[in-house]
Amino acid sequence: MPKAKSETKALAPNRPQLHSLLALRPYLARHSGMLIAAVVALITSAAAMLTIPLAVRRMIDVGFAAQDGVFIDRYFITLIGIGVLLALASAGRMYAVNWLGERIVADLRADVFQHLATLGPAFYDSTHSAEVMSRLTADTTQIKGAAGSALSQALRNLIMLVGALTMMFITSPTLAALGLATIPVIVLPLMAYGRAVRRLSRAAQDRLAEASAIAAENLAAVRTMHAFGQQETVARRFALACERAFDAARTRLRSRAGLTALSIGLIVSSVVAILWFGSRLVIGGEITGGRLGQFILYAMFAAGAIAELSEVWGEITQAAGASERLMELLAVRSTVTEPVRPRPMPTPALGTIGFEHVRFAYPSRPGAPALNGISFSIERGETVAVVGPSGAGKSTIFNLILRFYDPQSGSVAVDGVPVSAVETALLRSRIALVPQDVALFDDTVADNIRYGAPGASDADIVRAAKAAQADSFIRLMAQGYATRLGERGATLSGGQRQRIALARAFLRDAPILLLDEATNALDAESEMAVQEALARLTQRQTTLIIAHRLATVQRATRILVLDKGRIVEEGQHAELLRRGGLYTRLAELQFTLEAAQ
C-alpha cells in the first residue's frame, strides 16, 4: 500500500511501479477457491502443450523409421486426447481468470467508493470529482483486463517458458545453451523499451482523466452552459482535451507497436540461428531428426511465450499504473479523524452548542482566516440567527458544528462535549441540516425524503412532507410519492426542492436544526407556509439559522452579526436596528431591494 496521504493534498502523478499490483493480493485471497481452480487449469493447459513435442519426436524417430502405421495411428489418437484436455483446461482457465477479474474489480470499486464516502469536504475541495470518477471507472476497468486475461496469459506463458527451456536442455544441452545465450539479447532491450511504454501509459491515463473531468463538469452545469451560449466553446475545449488524450494514446501505441516489432524480430532471428545450427548437428549424426524437431517445437514454444509476454507486458504495466492511482485514493486519510477513546454524549440530548475562541482557515486558503477567534453559546430550544455579508464565516460555523473540518485552535462543543472527542456518526445523528444548495437524487420522492431517516415508514414520510408544506405538490405528480425526480431533482422548482429538504429535516427529528438560507428559494406564499412549519418545528429544537430575509431573522431569540470572521454585534432585531451598526446597514439594504422588487 502507498503511504497514507492527507485528504487536502492533490493526487499527484507518479511513475507506475509493478509492485503496486501486489496491493491486489487481498482481493485475490478472498476468492482462494477460484484462484486455485485457475492455477490448476493454467498448469494443466501448459503441461498439455509441453507434451506435444514428445509425441512428435516419438512419431518421427520410431513410427516413420519403422514405417509402422498402427504406431503412428496410436500417437495421432494420443494427440487428439491431448488436444481435448488442452481445450477443456483452456476453457476452465479462461472462465476462472475472467471470473476473478470481474470479481476483483467489483470488490475494488466497492471498497474505493466506500473509502471515498468517508473523506470529508477538504479532500473534494482540492480534488476534482471527475478525476476521482475516472479512477473509479476507467482505472478499475484497466485492472480488470490485467487481473483477467493479461495476468493469466502472463502466468501461462511464464510456465510455458520455464517448461520449454527445461525440455530444451533435456533434448539437447548444446542447442539449449545456444538458445539460453540469446535470451539476454532479447529480454534486455524489451525491458528498457517496456519502461518507456509504462511511462507513456500513465500519461495517456492522465490525459483521459482530464478529458473526463471537462465533460463531467460542463454536463453537470448544462443549464448555465446553454444560458450563456457556451456550447461551441465547451465542445471545442473538450475536443482539444480528447485530442491531447489521443496524442498520448497514439504515442503509447506507437511505442507498444515498436516493442512488438522488436520482440518478434529478435525472437525469429534467434530461432532461425538455432535451427541452422541444429541442422548441422543432424547432418553430423549428433542428434536425430525427431529430436531436432522436438527441440525446435520447444524453442518455438519458448519464443512464443517470450513474444506473448512482451505483448501482455504493456497491459500489465498499464494496469500497474491504474492500480497505483487507485491505491493513492485508498491511501488518502481524512484530516477529521475519529477519537481513539470517544466520549459519550448526554442522553437525552441537550441540544446546546458552544464555540470558544475558535480560529479556522480552510486548507485551500490557509492565509485567509474564515473565523477569527469567535466565541458564543446557544442554549437548548433557542433560535439563533447568523447574519453578515458574504464571506463573513456564516457557513463555516455550520461546517465546524458538523465537524466537516477541525479548527486550528479553540473548541467547538455540542451538548457540552467537544465535537472532536465524540464519534462523528453520533454527533451528526443529533443534527438536521437544510442546506442552501439542496442535494436531491435520481430516486423517488419518498426515498429522497427518507434520506433524512433511512428506517422511516411511508406514513412518517407523508407526515414530514405535510409539515414541510410539500404534500400538496407531491400528490399532484404523476405517481405521487413514487415519482422519480431525475438527476439533481431537475424536475422540481427551487422552492419545491427546498421543501423536500425541509421534509428531510422534519423526518430526522434531531435536537439541533441547522438552516442555511432555508427559505431563500421560496416565493412569498411558500415562504409563509414554510415559516409556519418552521415555527412549529423550532419550538422543541435548538435552531441555528443563516438568513438574510428579515421574516426569518425577526423571530430569532438572538442574532449574531459576523464580519470578517468575527462577531461584531449580538442581540435581538429591534435592539440591533437601534444601534445603527452593520446589522442596520444590512437591514436597510434588504428593505431597499424588496422595495425595488
Image (cartoon, rainbow, N blue to C red):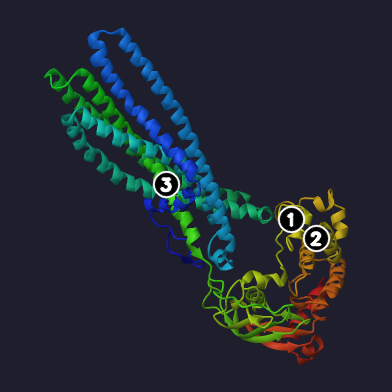
On residue 318, the disc is 3
- Residue 12, given in percent of the width and then of the height, sits at 44, 60
On residue 489, the disc is 1
| Residues at marks 3 and 1 touching, judged by CB atoms closer than 8 Å | no
The kind of residue tagged 2 is: Gln
Q: Check the image and name the residue furthest to the left.
A: 284
* For marks 2 and 1 on the same chain, the one whose residue lies earlier in the sequence: 1
In depth, the one of 56 and 212 nearer the eye is 56
Q: Crowding near pointer 3: few (<14 within 10 Å), some, many (20+)?
A: many
| Residues at marks 2 and 1 touching, judged by CB atoms closer than 8 Å | yes
Mark toward the viewer: 3 or 1: 3
In depth, the one of 79 and 23 nearer the eye is 79
Which residue, given by chain and number where applicable, does mark 2 sit on?
496
Q: Please indicate, yes or no, whether residue 569 appears anywhere in the rendered image.
A: yes
Circle count: 3
Q: Crowding near pointer 2: few (<14 within 10 Å), some, many (20+)?
A: some
- Residue 335, given in percent of the width and then of the height, sits at 53, 71
Give how far apart the Cα atoms at labels 2 and 1 are: 9 Å
* For marks 3 and 2 on the same chain, the one whose residue lies earlier in the sequence: 3
Relative to 366, does residue 579 appear above or below in the rendering? below
Give how far apart the Cα atoms at labels 3 and 2 are: 47 Å
Looking at the rendered structure, the secondary structure element under dot 3 is helix
